[in-house]
C-alpha cells in the first residue's frame, strides 16, 4: 500500500497542524519558522542522476557539472549509458561517479512504476544500485514521490534539529530516533520538513548559514 502522497502546500499544512496538536515542540517550531516548505521535485531518472552528481560537492559545483553533462548531450539515460568514461570525466565527474551514473542509466528501472510501489519496495528496488544509499532513496521518497510517512533517521541535520527542539542531551542515535519518530506517523515526512526548518532557523539565529 502506497499511503498518503504530499502534493501541495496544503498537505504539508495539514500534517504540520496534526503534529503541532499532538506535540508542543512542533507547535513551538511552527510558530518560530512559519509554514514548512513543500519542496516537491520531479521524480524519475533525472532526480537520481542529479543526486549522484551532487554527492560530496558543493551546490555550485554540482550545478556546474550537471550543466556540462547536459550541454554535452549526456542527460538522458541512453546517452549517459553509452558515453565514454573519458567524455564524462571531461564534464568534471569522478571515475566513481561515472560508474554510479552509468549503472543507474543502464539499470532498466521503470521509474514511473515506482510511484505505485510501497515505500519499502521502492527502497528495495533502488538500494542495490551503486552510489545510491538509503538516505538518497529516502530523499527521493520524500521529495520526488511525495510519500508522507518516510523519515531519514541518518540525516545529521534532522538529528541535530531534534536535539535542539526536544532539548536532548545529545543527537539521538538511530534506534532512539526511530522510536521518537514513530509517534509522528502518519506524517513523518512533514515532521522532517519541520525539523529541517527548525534547524535552518536556529543556524540563522546563531549567524551561521544552514
Image (tube, grey):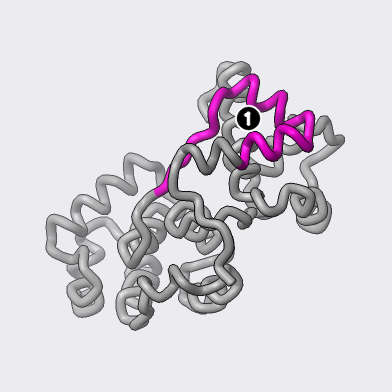
Say if 28 sits above or below 182 in the image. Answer: above
Residue 10 position in % (x across, y down): 49, 38
Name the quadrant containing residue 68: bottom left
Q: Residue at x 44, y 72 (%)?
A: 114
Residue 116 position in % (x across, y down): 46, 72
Say if 23 sits above or below 41 in the image. Answer: above
- How many marks the image carries: the answer is 1
Q: Which residues are magenta?
A: 15-40
Query: Left or right of 21: which side holds 70?
Result: left
Q: Residue at x 38, y 50 (%)?
A: 41
Query: Left or right of 66: which side holds 111?
Result: right
Name the quadrant containing residue 182: bottom right
Characterize the local packing of mark 1: few (<14), some (14-19) or many (20 or more) Cα atoms within 10 angstroms: many
Camera-side residue: 89 or 147?
A: 147
Query: Left or right of 24: which side holds 1?
Result: left
SS of the residue under disc 1: helix
Q: Considering the image in quadrants, where does the N terminus appear?
A: bottom right
Residue for badge 1:
198
Camera-side residue: 144 or 171?
A: 144
Query: Left or right of 61: which side holds 132?
Result: right
Q: Main secondary structure of the magenta part?
A: helix
Amino acid at each position: 500500500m502506497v499511503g498518503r502522497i504530499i502534493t501541495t502546500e496544503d498537505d504539508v499544512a495539514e500534517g504540520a497542524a496534526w503534529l503541532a496538536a499532538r506535540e508542543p515542540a512542533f507547535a513551538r517550531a511552527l510558530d518560530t519558522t512559519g509554514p514548512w516548505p513543500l519542496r516537491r521535485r520531479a521524480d524519475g531518472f533525472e532526480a537520481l542522476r542529479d543526486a549522484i552528481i551532487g554527492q560530496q560537492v558543493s551546490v555550485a559545483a554540482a550545478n556546474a557539472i550537471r550543466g556540462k553533462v547536459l550541454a554535452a548531450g549526456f542527460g538522458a539515460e541512453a546517452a549517459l549509458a553509452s558515453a565514454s568514461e573519458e567524455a564524462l570525466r571531461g564534464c568534471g565527474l569522478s571515475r566513481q561517479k561515472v560508474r554510479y551514473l552509468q549503472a543507474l542509466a543502464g539499470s532498466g528501472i521503470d521509474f514511473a512504476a515506482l510511484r505505485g510501489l510501497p515505500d519499502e519496495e521502492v527502497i528495495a528496488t533502488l538500494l542495490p544500485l551503486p552510489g545510491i544509499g538509503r538516505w538518497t532513496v529516502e530523499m527521493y521518497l520524500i521529495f520526488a514521490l511525495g510519500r508522507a510517512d518516510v523519515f531519514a533517521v541518518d540525516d545529521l541535520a534532522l538529528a541535530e534539529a531534534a536535539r535542539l527542539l526536544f532539548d536532548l542531551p545529545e543527537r539521538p542515535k538511530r534506534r532512539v530516533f526511530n522510536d521518537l519518530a514513530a509517534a509522528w506517523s502518519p506524517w513523518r515526512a512533514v515532521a522532517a520538513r519541520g525539523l529541517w526548518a527548525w534547524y535552518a532557523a536556529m543556524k540563522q539565529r546563531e549567524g551561521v548559514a544552514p
